[in-house]
Amino acid sequence: MQVGAASDIGRVRGRNEDALLVDDDHNFFVVADGLGGHPAGDVASRTAVETLDRHLDDLSRGDPADALVSALRAADDAIRSEAATDQRRAGMATTAVVARVTDGGEEAWVAHVGDSRAYLVREADLRRITRDHTTGGLFGRGSITQALGTGDGIDPDVTHIDLVPGDRLLLCTDGLTDMVPEDAIAKIAAAPDDPQAACQRLVDAANERGGVDNITVIVVEV
Ligand code: CA
């Protein structure tokens, strides 16, 4: 398994409120996007990643889908506890998309809350695995309907995928997908560059198109 990861502040924002986790030992990967308009988005995304990191051993036990949901619920709780300790953090929230891949790279489980996405890159094809938790709308993007830390509870979606050798999983924040059309993402993600080079090229593509938000990507090749 080969993994690349990159997180970039972009060209407009004053700080990077995205966070990521790459754990090669557990084949566990996370991208989180602290919500704009909420205070302390960076603390929320970091707390999510740290909490998920602490639950890695639990993830190896029991049903993988249930384990991912439990870990996301733990992160949701941790963010709310953290927010309760400091007025300036009240209401902080974050998206999260998490993927766990089996040791041999045959299967993956992907769970998410919010509008950070996972894609499967197979040959030249880009297939979206996640469905954004946003209010729909033909014109412009809707608002996020669930996130970690809001206090409204979470209902993560979990998808199981059978992988074939050469498949890539792409996890990313909306700083990529709002800037770069999916056909352009597909071209870069499916190019023969190694996963780290692919991540850097995706970040560059978002910045070339304006980079109005933080950009975070992980590419896992099995
Ligand atoms: Ca974002």
Image (cartoon, rainbow, N blue to C red):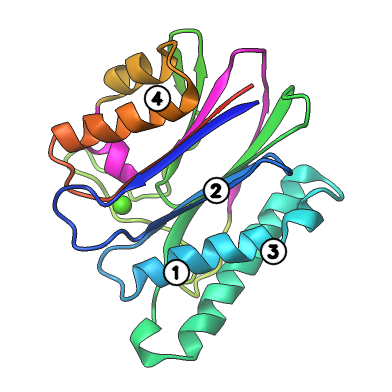
Element marked by disc 1? helix
Tag of residue 30? 2
Q: Quadrant of the C terminus?
A: top right
Is residue 217 depicted above or below 220 in this figure?
Answer: below
In this orientation, does residue 100 appear? yes
Q: Residues within 10 Å of mark 1 (few under 14, many from 20)?
A: many
Location of mark 4 (residue): 198
Location of mark 3 (residue): 54
Disc 3 to disc 4, C-alpha distance: 28 Å
Q: Mark 3 belongs to which amino acid?
A: Arg
**Label located before the other in sequence (2 or 4):** 2
- Work out whether residue 149 or residue 152 is closer to the camera in this orientation and state it: 149
- 96 sits left or right of 8 in the view: right
Q: Residues within 10 Å of mark 2 (few under 14, many from 20)?
A: many
Q: Residue at x 77, y 51 (%)?
A: 59
Location of mark 1 (residue): 44
